[in-house]
Image (tube, grey):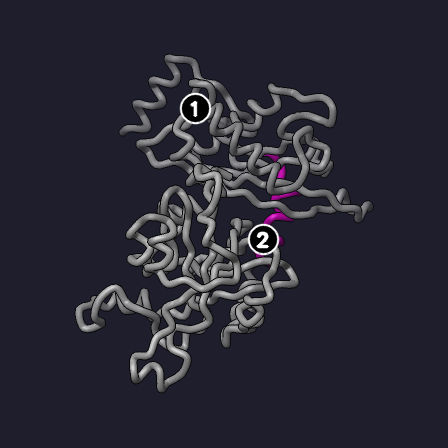
Amino acid sequence: MIDIHDKLPSDLIIGNEYTKQELDKLFKTSEIENIYGGIGKINNRLILLITLDKTYTAELPKNESEMSREEKEEHNYRHLDYFDMEENIFCWDGPTNMNLESPLIKDFTSKLYQCLLFVREYYHKDEYEFKNKITNDKYFYCGKIRYQKHIDTKIKHFISSLEDEPNKKLNHLYKFIPTELDERKKEFNILKEKEKNDFIELVHQEESRTHERKSTFSGNPGIKKEYMVESNLKAVCGFLNERGGNLMIGIEDDGEVTGIEKDYNYKDNDQFERHILFQMRKLMDKFEVIEKYIKFQFEYASLSDKDSSRKIVCRINCRPLPDDEVSYVNGKLYLRVGPQTNELSVKEALSWLKRRQK
């Protein structure tokens, strides 16, 4: 995680409350006061400002009479934001006007920047305060959070780990339960089950133009193999340049599930993903572009029908790049041809690029 500033402001203390104006002074900026969509970027750090109770609309960037229908819908949407202290996570719905490719969301999911979480229980406590315009302008500082995964609902739902120790001053926030929580969790569970079933089908799928299996990304324990890294990235490159596809890591050529646990660089799923992204950034051109078209998924898979033991398989899902973008590995162009990834000669590459432009 990038941390350009060695230390946070000394007056920023977990469990203490701050207004946006006070935070601007602490961070020596004037931009936090203008964050209305929940997330902003300040001094190479991400700031997340969350109001848990959505009974009443929080503050608006301008008078409601001056807002368009789309703007009103954006600020009236009942986002689902809550703590789950048993899992030590914070869950939140992204802004309605952003998607996974929006710059701020990309910064959050990339895990490259610190994300500081500020939460208040309510903006108006009750109807009396709402009618009399009595507001709660202070947020509790809840510490650093880190993206773990998201759920593909219409408004993306993000799950983040809490990076600091729980604080007693925040217990009322930890215990807050949104009224829609049970209903939304049912939706999440349906999506998770479908995603898991789709994943298991991919584990048993034969190699093809859109499907590739690799036993490891970097080699086996104690035996680091650089050619394995390039072989995996060539497959990713081939998928990106053609129809898209899935690279399944932790499966032998014959379909036997051996898992990524034996990979030379495997420590945990998060570290493994960061290692792969680092290698992509190092070896693949225009990484900041192609990263938008890549998604990681980790699931347990049984070794075989007869052996119920399970190992972790990593799926790298690649969507096809737009026609005006091309992926290269070490400056070379690769395409999927049947179940193989082929390097194109200069002549072949020029011909392919010309056809692609048409």
- Taking the image as shown, residue 209 lies to the left or right of residue 48, namely right
Residue lying at the far bottom in this picture: please name it: 128
Could you say which quadrant of the image residue 45 lies in? Answer: top left
Compare residues 325 and 208 and report the one nearer the observer. 325
Q: Which mark is residue 214?
A: none
Residue 221: image x %, image y %?
73, 27
The residue at which mark 2 appears reads as 164
Residue 335: image x %, image y %?
46, 26
Residue lying at the far right in this picture: please name it: 306
Whichever of callouts 1 and 2 sits on the residue coming sooner in the sequence is 2
At 42% from the left and 34% from the top, the residue drawn is: 290
- Taking the image as shown, residue 9 lies to the left or right of residue 198, namely left
- Kind of residue at badge 2: Asp
Residue 344 included in the magenta stretch of the image: no
Q: CA distance from mark 1 to mark 2?
A: 40 Å
Could you say which quadrant of the image residue 48 lies in? Answer: bottom left
Residue 204 included in the magenta stretch of the image: yes
At 71% from the left and 37% from the top, the residue drawn is: 261
Q: Provide the residue span drawn in magenta.
A: 192-207
- Kind of residue at badge 1: Tyr
- Taking the image as shown, residue 317 lies to the left or right of residue 345, namely right
Compare residues 284 and 166 and report the one nearer the observer. 166
- Vertical comparison of 229 with 202: above or below: above
Compare residues 153 and 29 and report the one nearer the observer. 29
Residue 175: image x %, image y %?
58, 71
At 48% from the left and 25% from the top, the residue drawn is: 282
Could you say which quadrant of the image residue 103 lies in? Answer: top left
Compare residues 164 and 67 and report the one nearer the observer. 164
The chief SS type of the magenta part is helix
The residue at which mark 1 appears reads as 328
> Would residue 149 be visible to someone looking at this image?
yes
Judged from the image, the secondary structure of the residue bearing numbered disc 1 is strand
